[in-house]
Amino acid sequence: MLLAALAVMAAACEKKTQPAPSGEGGTQAAQGQGAAPGGAPADANSILLGQVGALTGGQATFGISTRNGIELALKEANAAGGVKGKKLSIRVYDNQSKPEEAAQAATRLITQDKVVLILGDVASSNSLAMAEKAQAAGVPMITPSSTNPTVTEKGDYIFRVCFIDPFQGFVMAKFARENLKLNQVAVLQDNKSAYSIGLADVFTRKFTELGGKVTAVESYSQGDTDYRAQLTAIRKSQPEGIYVPGYYSEVGIVARQAREVGLKVPLMGGDGWDSEKLFELGGSAIEGSYFSNHYSPDNPDPRVQKFIADYKAAYGAVPDALAALGYDSARVAVAALERAKDLSGPAVRDAIAQTKDFPGVAGMVTLDAQRNAVKSAVVLKVEDGKTQYVTTVNP
Amino acid sequence: METPAIPVPEARSVVPASLRGLLPVLLALPVLALFQWLMSDAPFASYLLSVVGVNIILAVSLNIVNGMTGQFSIGHAGFMAVGAYISGVLSLNLKDIALSFLPVAVSDQVFFVLSLLVGGLAAALCGFLVGLPSLRLRGDYLAIVTLGFGEIIRVVVQNTDAFGRALGLSGIPQTSSPAMVYFFVFLTVLVARRITGSSHGRSLWAIREDEVAAEAMGVDTTGYKVRAFVISSFFAGIAGALFAHFVPIINPGSFTFVKSMEIVVMVVLGGLGSTTGAIVAATFLTLLPEGLRSLFTVLGAEGSLAQKVDQIRMPVYGLLLVVLMLARPQGLFGTKEIWDVLPRWIPRKRRGLA
C-alpha cells in the first residue's frame, strides 16, 4: 500500500516549468514591486534609513565602526540640508552575529519602521539573510563590507561598496609573488568563516598560477586559542610566508605562537586584520606582516584626511576601513536618494545602480552590472605598532 | 529494545481512540486556517511568531527528557541542526520538482512536509544512536554525551561543502508558514500531553523521582528513557526543519551550545516537567528582546538607547534566572499544567481532549 503510494508519487514527479512562486528572489522581487514599493516614511519631514549590524559579540568592533561611519556621513548630509529638503535619520538594530536575528531585524526595519533603504551588515552570512528579506520586499540594501560574492547575487536590490573576496586573495597572491618575491607559502585558514575560506581558496589558486608553491594548508576554528599544532606542521613545510586570512582576534595570537614555534617569516592577511586590537594582541610578533585592505589612513588625499579629522573629533579614534566603508555606503545612499525621482524602492534602486566614479574615502566607487564595486585595494605593512601604506593593487 | 519507537509520536497522538483521538486535530485546523489568514500580510509578525513557534517546539520536546524523565540533555541544538540541514538539503534538491496532479503551491507543501518528516526522522535516528549507549547509565553521562554530540554536528557541518560550510546553506525554498509551524507546535504539545497522561508518562515520572525504585517496580528504565529521548529528538529535528524553511540562511552559528542552553533555560524557567511552563517560558523569552526593542524605540531618542538593549539582554537573562531560582526553585509552573487547573471551570470541554 505504502509502496504503491510512493510509486505514484515518484511517477508524478516532474520538472517544474517555472520556479516555485516563493522560492527565488527574482519572482519575489516582481511581487514586491507591486505590493510594497519601498514604503514611504510615516514622518513627512524626515527620511528613515535602517542599519543592521553586529554590535555585540566577537566582531563587535566591526559593527560599531561601521555604525560610527554611517552616523558621521548622515550628520554631514543633514548639516548640508538633508535630502530633498528632508532630514535623514537612521534606526540601528543589533543582530548578535546570527543570521536569524539579522533576518528578523531586517524584516522589522522593512515592515514596522518602513525604512527607505537598508545598510547591511559586515559578516556575509548575516548580509545574505538580510538580502533575502530586502529583495523580497523590494527595499534597496547596500552592504558596506560584506565581501562574499554571493551576497549581491541575491537580486537587483542588493548592492555593495567594497570589493569581493576573490579580489583580496588575488591582491595578496600577486603582492606576495611579485613584490615580496616569495616562492613557497603556507596557508592557515579559519574553517569557521566563509570569508577566510574564500580568501584562502583564491589565494592558493592565484599564487600557484603565478608560479609559486603552496606548501601546506592548515585550518583552525574561530575562538581557538592554541594554534601550535598547525604552526608546527607549517614550519615543517618550510614556507617563506604564511597567509592567514582570519580575523584580528585570532591572528594576533597566531602571530605570537608562530614566533614561539620558531617561524620568523612574514604573515599575510586580508581586511579582517583591520583593528587596533591586532597590535595589542600581536605585539611585536605581528611586526613586518602585510595585509590587504580597503583604504589607508596615510592616503594624502584631502578628502580622506578630512574624513579622518572629522571622525577623530567625533569618536576619538582613527577610523578603520570598516568605518570608511560605512561612511562610503551611507554617502552613496544619500547621493542616490538625492538623485532618485522619488523614494520608492525601484526608483532608489535605479539611482544606486547608476553610481559611477563616486569619490569615496575608500577609493572611487563604480557599481558594475553585478552591483559590486569595482575599485582598487591597498596593501599595508605593520610597523611600530601601526600600519604603513605599501602599495595599491588594481583589479 | 523495539526500534519502531521512532514513528511513534504521530501514531500515538492520532490512532488510539479512533475518532476521539482525531478530534483535537480537526478542531485545530480551522483555527490555524484563520490564523494564517490573519497573518497573511504581516511578514514581521509571521516571522517573529514562527521563531516563537520553533522555540516552543524545542522547549516542549526538551521538557520530555529534561523535565518528565529527569535526564539532563544539553545538546538539543545539535538535533535541531540535524533536522535543519537534512531537510534543507532535501528541499534544495527537490526545489525544481513538482507533483503533476497537484497545483504547484500544494505540491510544494507536500514536499515541505516530506522534508520536515525526513529531518525529524534523521534527528530521531541520531537521538537513538546517542541515547542508546548513554541512557543505559545513570547520572550526568547524558549531559556530556549530548554536549559532545552538539559540537560534533556543528563541526561536521562547518567542514562539509554540501552543507555550505561556514557561510551556511541559503536558497532553501521558504515554504513555511505560521500555520504550518503552529500545526507542529500543536502536535508536539498534544504528544507531550498524551505522554504525561499515559502509563508511559507515569513510568517516566517514576524514573525522574527515583530511578532505582522505578527499576525495582519493574520499569524498563533504559527503554523508557531512550524512547522519550528519541521522541524529543524527533521534534527537535522538526523544529530545525521548520526553522530552515523560514530563515533565509542557516549557518552553524545558529546551532551552537548557546542555543542549547537557551532551550534548557526555557525549560527550567517554565518549570521542569511542565509543558505549559515550557510554552510560556519559550514565548516570553523569545518575545522579550523584541519587546524591549519596541519599548526603547518608543521611549528613547533615535537609536541611542535602543542600541544598548541587546547588549544588556544576556545579563538580564542571567539575573532573571538567578532571581527566579531563588524565589521559585521549581520554575514558574513547577510541574503543574494549565489543563490540571482549567477543568474546574470548564470540565466538559476539556474532557474531550483526555
Image (spheres, rainbow, N blue to C red):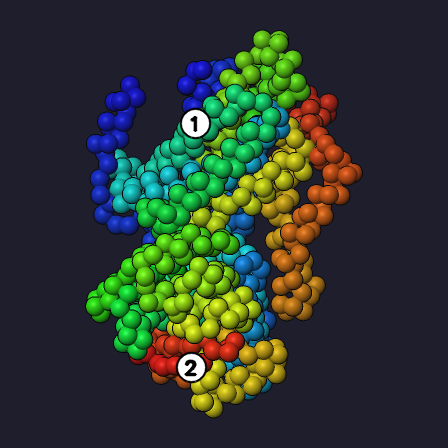
**Residue under pointer 2:** A389
The chain letter under disc 1 is B
The amino acid pointed to by label 1 is: Leu
Front-lying residue, A263 or B288: A263
One can see residue B36 in this view: no
Residue under the image location 22 percent in, 43 percent down: A15
Count residues near mark 2 (Cα–Cα under 10 Å), then give few for <14, some for 14-19, many for 20+.
Answer: some
Where's residue B339, x and y in %? 66, 26
Q: Is mark 1 on a helix, strand or loop?
A: helix
Residue B129, which numbered label? Answer: 1
Q: What element carries label 2?
A: strand
Vertical order, B84 against B27 (above or below): below
Residue A348, which numbered label? Answer: none
Instruction: Give the alpha-carbon distance from disc 1 to disc 2, as whole Å.
Output: 56 Å
One can see residue B12 in this view: yes
Where's residue B301, x and y in %? 67, 69
The amino acid pointed to by label 2 is: Tyr
Residue under the image location 40 percent in, 73 percent down: A290
Front-lying residue, B44 or A269: A269
Vertical order, A23 against A361 (above or below): above
Count residues near mark 1 (Cα–Cα under 10 Å), then give few for <14, some for 14-19, many for 20+.
Answer: few
Where's residue B50, x and y in %? 51, 44
Residue at the far front: name it: A262
